[in-house]
Image (spheres, rainbow, N blue to C red):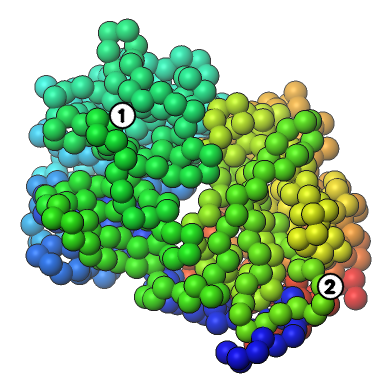
Amino acid sequence: MPETPVVKPYGSWVSPLSARRIAEAGVSLSAVRADGQTLYWLEGRPRERGRSVLMRYQNGAVDEALPTSFDVRSRVHEYGGGAYAVHGGRIVFSHVLDGTVWLARDGGEPRRITPCEALRYADFAFAPEGIYAVREDHRGSGEPVNSVVLLDPDRVGEGESVCFGRDFYAAPRPGPEGRLACIAWNHPDMPWDATALLLDGEIIAGRPGESILEPRWSADGRLHYISDRSGWWNLYVHNSEGGEALKPMAAEFAGSPWSLGAQNYHCLADGDLVARFERDGAVFVERLRSGPFETGFARPACPVPFSGGWAVLGADTDRPARLDLLREDGGRETLARAVPDDPDPAFVSCGEAVSFPTSGDRTAHAWFYSPKNPGYVAPRDERPPLIVRSHGGPTGASDNAYSPAIQYWTTRGFAVVDVNYGGSTGYGRAFRQQLHGQWGVVDVDDCCAAAMWLADTGKVDANRLVVRGGSAGGYTTLAALAFRDVFKAGASHYGIGDLKALARDTHKFESRYLDRLIGPLPEADAVYDARSPLLHAEHISCPVIFLQGTEDKIVPPDQTEAMAAALRAGGVPVALLLFEGEGHGFRRSENIVAALEAELSFFARILGFEAPDVPEVALLGGE
């Protein structure tokens, strides 16, 4: 790095963070579990074609817990989660390549315990009588059939159905005296809309419009859960009066349960609970009886108790995720890192919480990242281009944990705003419901308002605003380009162009999602048409880059290809990259590299500056 910063336009700065470094050096860390003195977690490896590896810490050493032929993932509800469980030296897990379930005992070779049929399993729990799991049966011609089953660990079988008849199930949790708690819900609800808490198949909690999550038994046999009956996801313990709030507050003890197996609190052996919650964008961890629990992370997951201490997976605003072991004697050890080395803080842009006015006298929220690279300064009076990020879901949220995908842009001289539009989680049920009937309106308004507010305050260049997003965020991106005149370019990662096609073609879990976000069909047919960017492609006049996996079952590739073709037919320049073998999101390192570099080249080409060290993306039509 030169002693005197080089004067160079925003966006064209040379960054130490290459796309290849992001894709090949990094891993994802998730699903920490404890079994006595042994810890387990999952490590997603783009360099191994996205394989999800079960890692283990025991006797002071870290190794892979299973042979390299296994990919520990589930596709229940398509988004998976809950792909393994451990207890008493046993590991049960889902092998994603064929959906089969395997059992390993005391370090021995895994043995298959379910047939090789069109069955998927997840959210496992050991019990004296066997292994409980959520099963999704794809053998019929209609919708897959979901149920809770009991697997026999000693033989191959599809499992005995013990809870069935509802559209969806989650979190089977065996309790004392052979009792079983679980969560269930039916179409058209999503799990953040309304769920019921079942005990031995009977509803014991869950009013209309109440989302109950994460049942868990304490050592003394009490059943706990998370409910948003107050307007916030808070902790409760079941009693004869329907449940007692343990720590009522305007805070969220859970996030949107897109995947199975979440653990936002734990019941401890001494009867206390340790829980993670979020309030006003900040994350807190507490033991309910004794108060704050110091994890050493700005954004920790809930600490996992194990013999001799705690395991904490977390991230900071200026450092990537890592898994730390906190010993009872006060010692600390890092067991795993998302990337091998922490970044130079001189290059790190930390997310600043911002709130801004938007349509309907509402307030929306976002994280704003300024450009940061000590080797460069921009020409006098130049303002940076702005990338508006629209998160997926749309029932989801963005946070300010260190993200190489954001730093990739800020180290090159882009500003980034990561928007939590109306409908996002983390701000209570009422904020989440702002998107009911308003998808394609409220989210678009809030992303546009964020960009214009930052331009009006002089933080970014009003003439160089671009928008990007994946999945539902890709829809918001395309809708913003079709129905507003704010942005100069857009990037759609497996985004939705045709809402009726999405409702018709998507998988079971989301097949009625749009009933709440748009309206039920056929009654809301005209609304679907009015908000589908594909049907209004003639209103998109700025260039768009499309990035899509060919095996995507959630947003099929024909949606993206149709959208790109419609723009080309109207003379709009587009770039289209199809990635063979990828699904809903890119897991392979070579595709992550290609997507990042293509997007950078595209924005540079459209906004009129040089993007060093990346190949030029090809534009189709319009030139």
Within the image, what quadrant is residue 421 found in? Answer: top right
- Label 2 secondary element: loop
Do callouts 2 and 1 mark residues in contact (Cβ within 8 Å)?
A: no
Answer whether residue 337 is visible to the viewer in this image: yes
Quadrant placement of the N terminus: bottom right
At x 65% / y 48%, what residue is drawn? 354
- On screen, residue 341 versus residue 377, left or right, reads left
In the image shown, does 321 or 369 lie closer to the viewer? Answer: 369
In this rendering, the label closer to the viewer, 2 or 1: 2
518 lies above or below 455: above
- Label 1 secondary element: strand
383 lies above or below 439: below
Residue 25 coordinates in the image, percent (x, y): 42, 76
In the image shown, does 291 or 587 lie closer to the viewer? Answer: 291
Q: Mark 1 points at which residue?
A: 215
State the mark number for residue 381: 2
Residue 414 coordinates in the image, percent (x, y): 69, 69
In the image shown, does 423 or 122 lie closer to the viewer? Answer: 423
